[in-house]
Amino acid sequence: MKKKLLSVLLCATMVAALFAGCGSKEEEAAAEPAAEEAEEPAKEAEEPAEETAEAATEGCPGVDGLNIGICIYKFDDNFMTLYRTELQKYLEAGGATVTVMDGKNDQAEQTNQIQNFITQGVDVLIINLVQSSAAEQVTDQCAAANIPVVFINREPEAAEEERWASEGIAATYVGADARQSGTYQGEIVLATENKGDFNGDGKVSYVMVMGDPENIDAQYRTEFSIKALTDAGVEVEKLDEQRGDWDQAKGQEIVANALTANGDAVEVVFCNNDAMALGALQAIEAAGRTVGEDIMLLGVDALVEALENVQSGKMTGTVFNDHIGQSHAAAEIAGKMAAGEAVDVQNMVDYIKVTNENAADILALLQ
Ligand code: GAL
């Protein structure tokens, strides 16, 4: 039952929840209580839950017979692997022919892949850019070939999105507002008894492990996690801030170094994603520190391993980066654009805060 309710809850949290996507018709029957039970995204949950209930299907609607090109910034990324697997599954279940390319974290290589898709004459492109700054060039290439493009995960500049609207270009972005995920990380710390101040010196001394700093998700999570603390009147002290490029090994190395340099002074480790938090946990344990007793550890994404750690107390919390909601919205919007429908230039899906109170529910949802 929990799983069913959460499934509905997930649908309910999509700001663009008019796109169908999660759960079967039977699952949606219990939509209303789910919205009420929801702690986090309760805001506007009720109405979208009902709308989603009407539209739920197994495969993506509106893509049958389409030829769709997908470009992922690199395959070797935990979160984007979950995302692309779900995206491909949902599109293929809806009857689309899908080709997925690995950009290998190289914009020049990805630009070639996009060019090939254009030459092949795909109906629509779904692109997770290597560099968001490439959006203008890529958009113009697609527009010249009359191929609509759905950007995912790495949001282009606001000015570029405004250009799509003002020039009537068939381009859009589907993602999540990373400010929300950062804020949720800060709120998880604020909800604890000592609010992150283990040594009682009146301030929270933290280490920040950033993703790729060109990525707006990394920028916003870094800024808004701390802003949540300072907005609540909590004094903070930044002991270290390093880029870990979303990578577990780099997260481990950064936190090991920070713990060597600062010792017990480190009270909270914020990681912009779970892969780096898993690396941070290795470093924390190797240094003889214990999450929940003398240090806090936070991530984002809700990878299964991280959820298990949150459940067992080895991580303080994470934030569910809803790859199911995002990939379904991207797929459905791609179908609409291929059919010539106008869509909004920005489509956001909500995050969900995860602590040991709801980690099991999110785990059940993903399994
Ligand atoms: C973020 C995610 C990271 C990484 C990144 C890639 O949204 O939290 O783990 O996948 O996207 O751009």
Image: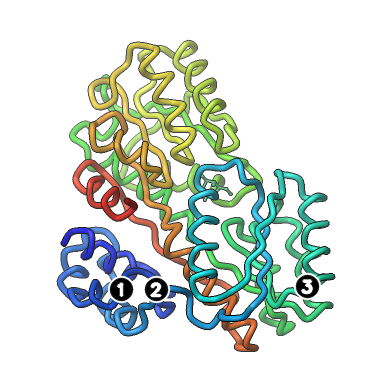
Residues under labels 1 and 3: Cα distance? 35 Å
Q: Quadrant of the N terminus?
A: bottom left
Report helix, strand or loop for mark 3.
helix
Left or right of residue 18, residue 28 in this image: left
Mark 1 and 3 residues: CB-CB less than 8 Å, in contact? no
In the shown orientation, is residue 108 left or right of residue 194?
right
Give the quarter of the image for residue 330: bottom right
Please state which of residues 135 and 34 is positioned toward the viewer in this rendering.
Answer: 34
Residue at which label 3 appears: 142
Look at mark 2 in the image and give the residue it sits on.
58
Q: Residue at x 50, y 75 (%)?
A: 94
The answer for how far apart the CA atoms under marks 3 and 2 are is: 30 Å
Say which of marks 3 and 2 sits in front: 2
- Disc 1 target residue: 24
Q: Amino acid at mark 3?
A: Cys
User: Which quadrant of the view contains residue 171?
Assistant: bottom right
Q: Secondary structure at mark 1?
A: loop
